[in-house]
C-alpha cells in the first residue's frame, strides 16, 4: 500500500493578495452586470424609436433584450462561480458589498 501524500498546491496568501483577488473578482462581476444593463437600455431605446416612428424594429429590440438576458444569466452564473473567498472558498455575497470579513474564515476581504 502506497503512503498517502498531500499534493496540495495551496500557498498562504498575504492580506494584499487576498484583497486584490476579491476586488478583481468583484470587478469582473460588475462589468458583466453593467454590460447587461447597457443592452437592456439599448433594447428599450430601439423599441421606443420603433414605436414612435411606426417602423418595425421589434426584431432588433427583441435581439437586444435576448442579449441582455443572456448577459444577466452569464453574470449570475459567473458571480456564483468566482465570487468566493480565496482562502476558504466560501461564497461571498455580491450584493452586500459592505461585507468586510469572510464569514467562513474571518479573513479581511476589503
Image (cartoon, helix red, strand yellow):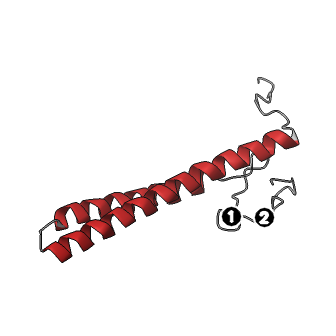
Q: Nearer the viewer, mark 2 or mark 1?
A: 2
Given residues 16 and 13, the one toward you in this image is 16
The C terminus - image quarter: bottom right
Name the element at disc 1: loop
Q: How many marks?
A: 2
Mark 2 or mark 1, which has the lower sequence index? 1
User: Residue 28: percent from the left, percent from the top?
Assistant: 58, 48
The quadrant where residue 45 appears: bottom left
Task: Name the residue at the left extreme.
Answer: 55
Given residues 64 and 75, the one toward you in this image is 64
Taking 18 as reference, is 56 above or below it?
Answer: below
Whole-Å distance between the Cαs marked 2 and 1? 8 Å
Disc 1 designates what residue? Answer: 93
- 107 left or right of 28? right
- What mark, if any, has residue 99 been given in the picture? 2
The quadrant where residue 24 appears: top right
Name the element at disc 2: loop
The answer to whether one can see residue 82 in this image is: no
User: Residue 35: percent from the left, percent from the top?
Assistant: 46, 55
Pointer 2: residues within 10 angstroms few (<14), some, or many (20+)?
some
User: Residue 58: percent from the left, percent from the top?
Assistant: 18, 68
Q: Could you tell me which residue is drawn at 54 percent across and 52 percent down?
A: 31
Circles 2 and 1 in contact, beta carbons < 8 Å: yes
Q: Could you tell me which residue is drawn at 78 percent across and 34 percent down?
A: 10
Q: Could you tell me which residue is drawn at 65 percent across and 62 percent down?
A: 94
Amino acid at each position: 500500500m502506497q503512503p498517502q501524500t498531500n499534493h496540495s498546491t495551496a500557498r498562504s496568501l498575504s492580506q494584499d493578495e487576498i484583497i486584490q483577488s476579491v476586488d478583481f473578482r468583484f470587478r469582473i462581476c460588475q462589468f458583466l452586470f453593467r454590460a447587461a444593463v447597457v443592452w437592456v437600455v439599448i433594447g428599450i431605446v430601439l423599441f421606443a424609436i420603433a414605436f414612435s416612428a411606426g417602423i418595425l424594429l421589434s426584431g432588433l429590440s427583441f435581439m437586444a433584450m435576448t442579449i441582455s438576458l443572456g448577459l444577466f444569466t452569464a453574470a449570475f452564473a459567473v458571480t456564483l462561480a468566482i465570487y468566493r473567498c480565496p482562502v476558504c472558498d466560501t461564497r461571498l455575497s455580491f450584493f452586500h458589498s459592505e461585507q468586510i470579513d469572510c464569514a467562513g474564515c474571518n479573513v479581511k476581504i476589503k
